[in-house]
Amino acid sequence: MWREKLIFTGAMSIKRSTPKVSLIFALFIILLAPSCAKEAQSEVTVYENGFESNDLSGITSGAISAYNGSKILGFYNKSGFTLQVDELPAHDLVEVSFDLFIHDTWDGNKQGVGVVNGPDMWKMIIDGKEFISTTFSNTDCGIYTCNTQSFPFAYPNFNTNPKTGAFRTDLPGLCLLNGTVGGTTQYKIKYQVRHERSTLIIQCLDELKESIATDQLCDESWSIDNLKVKAISL
């Protein structure tokens, strides 16, 4: 039986009580259950946008910004966007893929004592159903402290090291950490879900928490690029 899956390539470190187990891999990570062996018979790209032409067709609450010599959809804090794709051809699955940029001071699973600065959550919802609900940490581990994250797993099931599963960790920050190498982390997200309707609605949003920052959008935010949707027939 086919099940939804999140696919990514990256490095993973899972925090345990003792010892720390580090796994470096280039494998498919399957959430919920493994996929079946049935191969795709056809794939049709039904939506693709790199945002360089400022095209926001089909997008609600869209905002295009410049970042690192390119254009991105975002940046967002306590908000997000909705994409609606209509007139999909007959299909069995949809595949949603994009670059996700985590900017500046995300605190991951941290909740704080006396100060609310987490958990910093990010979500993807397809046709009203939540498929990704996780946290990201964009801070480095210290000698005695480490703000862990849940990605590539669902919050709050795991404590993985900051930037686990990242595609790039050497990008400059966007606002508060503007110009600081490592201030932005890039993730490659690819998600397949069973879908047969002619209309697809994708929502991406956050639940960022920071009680003391004077400019919360500058303190921590996110954006995406290279958004693509495929309709797949089995």
Image: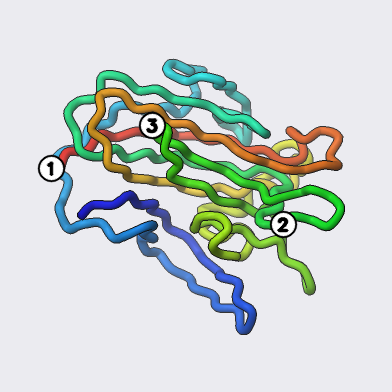
Label 2 crowd bin: few (<14), some (14–19), many (20+), radius 10 Å? some
Q: Position of residue 75 (x, y in %)?
A: 63, 31
| Amino acid beneath label 1 | Gln
Reading the image, the residue beneath label 3 is 127
Reading the image, the residue beneath label 2 is 110
* Residue drawn where x is 71% and y is 61% of the image: 147
How far is mark 2 from mark 1, CA to CA? 44 Å
* Residue drawn where x is 48% and y is 18% of the image: 56
Q: Position of residue 199 (x, y in %)?
A: 31, 23
Front in this rendered view, residue 200 or 141: 200
| Amino acid beneath label 3 | Asp
Relative height, residue 117 to residue 82 (above, below): below
Q: Do the residues under discs 3 and 1 have CB atoms within 8 angstroms? A: no
Dot placed on the residue nearer the N-terminal end, 2 or 3: 2
Q: What number is the disc on residue 41?
A: 1
Q: Position of residue 179 (x, y in %)?
A: 74, 42
User: SS class of the residue under badge 3?
Assistant: loop
Q: Where is residue 113 in the image (x, y as percent from the top left)?
A: 83, 57
* Residue drawn where x is 23% and y is 52% of the image: 2
105 with respect to 5 (left or right): right
Label 1 crowd bin: few (<14), some (14–19), many (20+), radius 10 Å? few
How far is mark 3 from mark 1, CA to CA? 24 Å
Front in this rendered view, residue 200 or 62: 200
Please identify, in this view, whether the residue under mark 3 or under mark 1 is nearer the observer: 3
Relative height, residue 43 to residue 30 (above, below): above
**Can you see residue 181?**
no
| Amino acid beneath label 2 | Lys
* Residue drawn where x is 61% and y is 46% of the image: 121
Please identify, in this view, whether the residue under mark 2 or under mark 1 is nearer the observer: 2
Label 3 crowd bin: few (<14), some (14–19), many (20+), radius 10 Å? some
